[in-house]
Amino acid sequence: MIRLGVNIDHVATLRNARGGTEPDPLAAAFAAIEGGADGITMHLREDRRHIRDDDLARVRASIALPLNMEMAATAEMVEIACRTKPHACCIVPERREEVTTEGGLDAAGQQAALAPMVARLREAGIRVSLFIDPDPAQLRAAASLGVPVIELHTGTYANGAAGELARLEQAARLAAELGLELHAGHGLTLGNVGPVAQLPGLRELNIGHSIVADAILVGLPEAVRRMRAAMDAASAGEGSSVA
């Protein structure tokens, strides 16, 4: 069974729109777990536009399931991660002017800067992954850095780019050859998750925005159940539609 990590960032986006305390990301984490999430993902951005330090600390202290902290490759974030000690950290590219993450990390071009950060996180007992495009050079750079996991950026696929699913499939096969555990995420919905869930060797999907959007209409536990069902049906070769 493919694991589902539910990203709760946009619960915090909604809270921050009015500057109050509701909806609470911690309550959202519990609701996602009720719906069948295998873990919780939170991106602590440098500008704190959604998740805040206190959100991260409270969820880490309160849930029994794995917490995956998405983070930029900065000294500040490495220190926060080593202090918080989530189960995993996924290093992602980050630009303050972007609305959401626009592509994968350039691991191949930043190996010298990334190496000490990866080493520090691993020494703290944190599983490290890199969020990268399905590019062979990026996968090989990840393997050279000694990370055990990569997360393939599926945003280009989700936007309908021709040939992108084939690139993801080729990257999945290369990940297996390199001994990298394969995760994927970004822009995935009930309507497009099926082919990604069928990638060879896929172990985990991290999905946030579409689940939170669906939750407005059906509630967060049910939104998670629907995504879980779509993933499971696709990986079992039954298609990805959900009644």
Image (cartoon, helix red, strand yellow):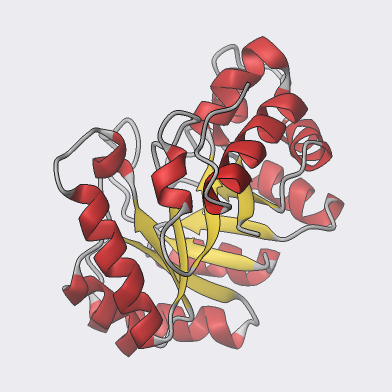
Q: Position of residue 201 (x, y in %)?
A: 47, 70
- The residue nearer to you, when weighing 13 against 66, is 66
Q: Quadrant of the C terminus?
A: top right
Query: Residue at image x 55%, y 69%?
Result: 79
Viewer-proximal residue among 124 and 64: 64
Q: Quadrant of residue 113?
A: bottom left
Q: Is residue 178 left or right of residue 156?
A: right
Determine if residue 113 is in view.
no
Q: Is residue 221 left or right of residue 208?
A: right
Whether residue 18 appears in this view of the structure is yes
Residue 14 coordinates in the image, percent (x, y):
58, 19
- Left or right relative to 179: residue 104: left
Residue 83 picture location, percent across and down? 67, 68
Total tally of numbered discs in the picture: 0
Q: Position of residue 191 (x, y in %)?
A: 44, 28
- Quarter of the image containing the N terminus? bottom right
Is 175 rendered above or below residue 240?
below
